[in-house]
Amino acid sequence: MTAVTDDLTTKPCRCGGVKKQLLNFISPEGTDLSVPVRAGWYCESCGEFEKAILRERVVAGMTEKDLERRDGKEDQ
């Protein structure tokens, strides 16, 4: 049995490797923002992909400031 956690950046894979999250970026209609959405997890060892569903698609901790930093638009 695996422990329940809110950290969805990685998941164990059946092959013994680690699946890492893959992100897509969407632009909500009427905005210039790019919002991260988790597409799923990919294991580099065996190539298995697991699609994210429902709440798993939400990337926790990403704020507008994080997006600005990522895009290099942060005020200095």
Image (tube, rainbow, N blue to C red):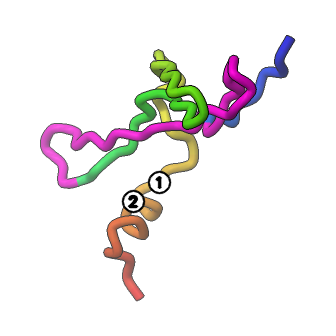
- The correct choice, above or below, for 1 with respect to 23 in the image is above
Q: Percent x, y for residue 70?
A: 40, 65
- Dividing the picture into quadrants, the one containing residue 28 is top left
Circle 2 is placed at which residue position? Answer: 67
Magenta residue check for 6: no
The residue sitting at 60% across, 33% down in the picture is: 45
The magenta stretch is 9-32
Mark 1 surroundings within 10 Å by alpha-carbon count, few (fewer than 14), some (14 through 19), many (20 or more): few
Question: At numbered mark 2, what does the secondary structure look like: helix, strand or loop?
Answer: helix
**Could you say where residue 55 lies in the image, as x and y percent from the top left?**
52, 22
Residue 63, image x, y percentages? 47, 54
Q: Specify the amino acid type for callout 1.
A: Thr
Q: The N terminus appears in which quarter of the rendering? A: top right
Q: Residue furthest bottom?
A: 76
Q: Secondary structure at mark 1?
A: loop
Q: Is residue 71 left or right of residue 45?
A: left
Q: Are marks 2 and 1 in contact (CB under 8 Å)?
A: yes
Residue in the picture at 48% in, 32% down: 58
**Residue 28: mark:** none
Picture quarter with the C terminus: bottom left
Query: Which residue is identified by label 1?
Result: 63
Could you tell me which residue is drawn at 84 percent across and 21 percent down? 3
